[in-house]
Image (cartoon, helix red, strand yellow):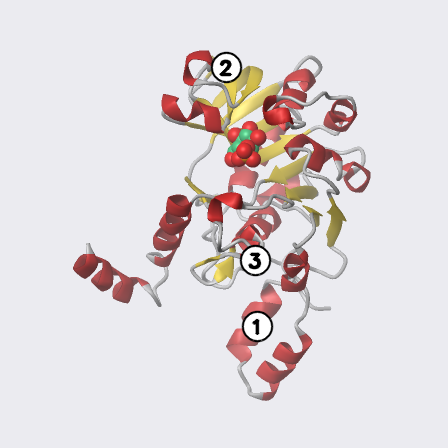
Amino acid sequence: MREGISGSYHGTGNAVAPRGTAERDGGMSGIRKVVFPVAGLGTRMLPATKVLPKEMLPVVDRPIVEYAVQEAAAAGCEVFVFVTGRGKSLIEDHFDRAFELFETLARKGKTRELEALEAALPDPGSIVYTRQQAPLGLGHAVWCARNIVGDEPFGVILVDDLVHARTPCLAQLAAVHAETGGANVVAVEEVPSEHTSRYGILDPAEDDGRRVRVRAFVEKPKPEEAPSRLAVIGRYILSPRIFSILEDLPPGAGGEIQLTDAMTRLLEHEPFYGVRFEGRRFDCGDRVGYLEANLALAMERPDIAARLHAFLRHYV
Ligand code: G1P
């Protein structure tokens, strides 16, 4: 049987998560399923995203969404749940076998290219797609995955947030989930106070420098109303109880069903930790963040770095 991305992930030498001891450690964490909410329109990247799903924009030479799937696979996830929307079918095509291309590469003896494409294919049946039928918010998108996730803790990855780390970010969260006996976990990062209105912000309790016990979350507060500068980054491990909370949740900030509002309610029943993760996060939904991700990852590619470096020195 073919060994695809979730069967045995070896990367192709240019994966976002450099191979390390933690690769595939998440298998022990018990997080089998991961949800990717990808229905968003990508208005911050227009006109590039007028036709092309923002998740299909390339960082160096692979679509952003592939980094996210690789991260989840490296954390031990086996079921990849995409909550998509209209106009996102290229994502499905990307994770499918492109028959004409594969046959042509095989016929021409382009074994290396073919193997790289094969390695990035998820195992048959490991990807599930469902559609969010209306843009009602991130909380609603996650709720759309309820019947596929069922009654087990699961991961959520916001594809726009590309995290470049030695240990994949979701695996770092899974480690804290295991250490804390199954607590809910979210990745956090300190942001400048003038940026709090772009993020979910933590109201922190105890803080040991790595793990922050959470008291509450506030979605996109103004700087003067923010309880801290610790922002939620797009990586979560959540208990399935979140689905019943989302079921009756009224709209919050921006008139949308907010995941952070449901997370605050979840805190009444279960503990929640923020994790200051090791690694660097790039907001690929933003023009500058997207360009930074391209440069940072390209400079780590032996086949690209030298030429790019010479060009940048000349240009800058
Ligand atoms: C979403 C979440 C927010 C989080 C952010 C991280 O916001 O609602 O809590 O901090 O992702 O990227 P969005 O970027 O979809 O507005």
Residue found 54% across the figure and 46% down from its top: 42
Q: Name the spot of residue 67 as percent of width and height, x first.
A: 53, 52
For the residues labelled 1 and 2, say whether their Cβ atoms are less than 8 Å apart. Answer: no
- Left or right, 105 with respect to 289, comes to right
Residue pointed to by mark 3? 52
- At label 3, which amino acid type do we have? Leu
**Dot 2 crowding, Cα within 10 Å, few <14, some 14–19, many 20+:** some
Q: Which secondary structure lies at badge 2?
A: strand
User: Sequence order check: which comes first, mark 1 or mark 3?
Assistant: 3
**Residue in the image at 54% along x and 17% along y:** 213
Image coordinates for residue 73, horizontal then vertical, percent: 61, 50
- Which of the four quarters of the rendered structure image does ligand 1 lie in? top right
What is the distance, in whole Å, between disc 1 and disc 3 at their CAs?
Answer: 26 Å
Q: CA distance from mark 1 to mark 2?
A: 46 Å
Marks 1, 2: nearer the viewer: 2
The nearer-to-camera label among 1 and 3 is 3
Crowd around label 3: few <14 · some 14–19 · many ≥20 (10 Å) = some
Q: Which residue is mark 1?
A: 115
In the rendered image, which residue does mark 2 sit on? 204
Indicate the position of residue 94 as horizontal and vertical percent values: 63, 63
